[in-house]
Image: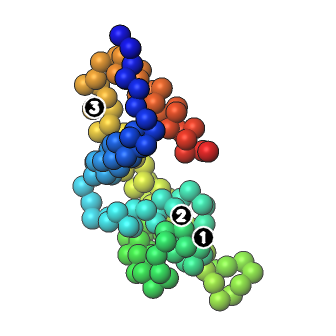
Amino acid sequence: MTAKRVPPAQLAPQLRDAITRLNRRVRQARPVGDLTVTQLSALTSLNLAGALTPRELADVERVQPPTMTKIVAKLEERGLVQRTPHPTDGRQVILAATEGGRAVLDQFERARNEWLATRLAELTEDERETLRRAADILQGIARA
């Protein structure tokens, strides 16, 4: 059986749509809680960066500083983010995820991984191997 050749211009929108839909569905698989997608994203950015100023976090999340102020206030209210004085600029603060914030992120990640693992278990061994190879290829594209 010969593989069907698909031109890159035809594959691009099909692949982008599949990745977008899968990403959206994985994001929906989350533990019960009232954390918004925006709050979760900001918390994830802080966790990955270690610590950021509010301005840096707003830039990373591509939102305006007043919007980030509201997001951080909600996270701080729940004990998921802490503020500490900036070591060199007394006008600034540094934001970091708390231990509780990291635990919430772990819960979200576990829920998403469990959802996806359940879907993958429904596939054949050959389909899972194809997806493993595709994951390697997609990681390479993302790093390019």
Q: Amino acid at mark 3?
A: Thr
Q: Which residue is mark 1?
A: 52
Q: Residues within 10 Å of mark 1 (few under 14, many from 20)?
A: many
Residue placed most toward the observer, 13 or 106 = 13
Farthest right residue? 88
**On-image quarter of the N terminus:** top left
Q: In this rendering, does residue 30 appear at all?
A: no
Q: Which residue is mark 3?
A: 118
Q: Secondary structure at mark 2?
A: helix
Q: Check the image and report above or below for 67 versus 105.
A: below
Q: Secondary structure at mark 3?
A: helix
Q: Residues within 10 Å of mark 2 (few under 14, many from 20)?
A: many
- Tell me whether the residue at label 1 lies in contact with that at label 2, contact meaning CB atoms closer than 8 angstroms: yes
Q: Secondary structure at mark 1?
A: loop
Q: Is residue 83 left or right of residue 128?
A: right
Q: Earlier in the sequence, mark 2 or mark 3?
A: 2
Q: Position of residue 70 (x, y in %)?
A: 40, 81
Q: Amino acid at mark 2?
A: Leu
Q: Amino acid at mark 1?
A: Leu
Q: Residue at x 49, y 68 (%)?
A: 61
Q: Is residue 6 left or right of residue 91?
A: left
- Tell me whether the residue at label 2 lies in contact with that at label 3, contact meaning CB atoms closer than 8 angstroms: no
Q: Residue at x 41, y 26 (%)?
A: 5
Q: Check the image and report above or below for 22 versus 89.
A: above
Rendered image: mark on residue 21: none
Q: Quadrant of residue 139?
A: top right
Q: Which residue is mark 2?
A: 46
Q: How is the image coloured?
A: rainbow
Q: Earlier in the sequence, mark 1 or mark 3?
A: 1
